Image (tube, rainbow, N blue to C red):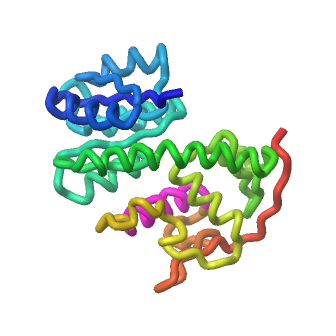
């Protein structure tokens, strides 16, 4: 089945460019000029992935990203024409799986869309390979099948596919140092700021699982080498 992509951007030229690039690679693409239009279609038929422009005419694109992530489980990529790295980081902080900066190369767009979709498929495959198991560590339970974290005290949180893939790497290799290269998609390593993307996702994970994210006890930085999950991991079958 073709993967369904929603593109939410108020610029007709950008919508046409994105649509053409993705359709050439076999994606089913629907475009929207406003967040309101997209919301209506998402409620009727959720896509596999949304590409959301930050500068929408009827709402803040970052707020839409947060809203979509909280309500529906699908991939999210932020599209921005702003040059500052802070806008890209904000997109990841608000729950996006990735970001693309205008102007962009169509090949980069296709690579990033494919990467986000592949992450989700890998998580489903990992869940199947692990026999629908859940990983327990440091008082937390990570359910790979539905991208959720739950704590023994009742707290619960959702993960983006990128965050879940990072956490899966850690729980499959506890107490081992993992380099940024081991934690990053191979097809995007040539991007100048890919290490920053890893750091932002690590920061988001820490905010969710650490008692004090400024003094992490579970996901530790090993300077000059990478990161390490300082916890024993036990696996249990999901109920």
Q: Say if the magenta span includes residue 6.
A: no
Residue 33: image x %, image y %? 23, 23
* 94 over 20 or under it: above or below: below
What type of secondary structure mainly makes up the magenta span? helix
Residue at 52% from the left image edge and 77% from the top image edge: 226
User: In the image, residue 98 lies at what x, y percent?
Assistant: 39, 49
Report the front residue among 132 and 107.
Answer: 107
The magenta span reads 195-209
User: Where does the image place residue 183, in percent across and percent down from the top left?
Assistant: 53, 66
> 72 left or right of 27?
right
Which of the two residues, 90 or 183, is positioned nearer the viewer here? Answer: 183
Q: How many marks?
A: 0
Direction from residue 152 to residue 211 in the image, left or right: left
Q: Is residue 212 left or right of residue 97?
A: right
Image quadrant of residue 232?
Answer: bottom right
The answer to whether 70 appears left or right of 78 in the picture is right
Residue 152 visible in the shown view: no
**Residue at x 47%, y 59% (from the top left corner):** 201
Q: Is residue 91 above or below residue 7?
A: below
Identity of the residue drawn at 74% across and 49% down: 153
In which quadrant will I find the N terminus? top right
User: Is residue 201 or residue 155 the one in the foreground?
Assistant: 201
| Residue 101 appears in view | yes
> Which residue shows up at 21% across the image and 29% down it?
16
* Residue 26 locus on image (x, y percent): 40, 32
Compared to 8, does 222 lie above or below? below
Residue 208 falls within the magenta-colored stretch: yes
Q: Is residue 123 above or below residue 220?
A: above
Residue extending furthest bottom? 224
User: Which quadrant holds the C terminus?
Assistant: top right
């Amino acid at each position: 089945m073709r993967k369904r992509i929603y593109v939410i951007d108020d610029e007709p030229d950008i919508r046409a460019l994105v649509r053409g690039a993705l359709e050439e690679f076999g994606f089913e693409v629907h475009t929207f000029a406003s967040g309101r239009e997209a919301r209506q279609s998402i409620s009727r038929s959720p896509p596999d992935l949304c590409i959301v422009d930050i500068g929408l005419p009827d709402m803040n694109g970052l707020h839409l990203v947060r809203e979509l992530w909280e309500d529906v489980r699908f991939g999210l990529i932020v599209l921005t024409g702003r040059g500052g790295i802070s806008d890209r980081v904000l997109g990841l902080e608000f729950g996006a799986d990735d970001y693309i900066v205008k102007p962009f190369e169509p090949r980069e767009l296709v690579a990033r869309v494919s990467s986000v979709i592949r992450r989700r498929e890998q998580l489903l495959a990992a869940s199947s390979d692990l026999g629908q198991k859940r990983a327990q560590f440091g008082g937390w339970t990570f359910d790979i099948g539905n991208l959720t974290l739950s704590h023994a005290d009742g707290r619960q949180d959702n993960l983006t596919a990128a965050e879940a893939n990072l956490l899966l790497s850690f729980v499959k290799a506890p107490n081992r140092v993992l380099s940024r290269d081991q934690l990053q998609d191979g097809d995007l390593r040539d991007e100048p700021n890919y290490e920053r993307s890893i750091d932002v996702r690590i920061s988001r994970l820490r905010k969710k699982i650490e008692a004090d994210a400024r003094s992490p006890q579970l996901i530790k930085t090993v300077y000059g080498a990478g990161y390490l999950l300082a916890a024993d991991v036990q696996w249990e079958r999901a109920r």
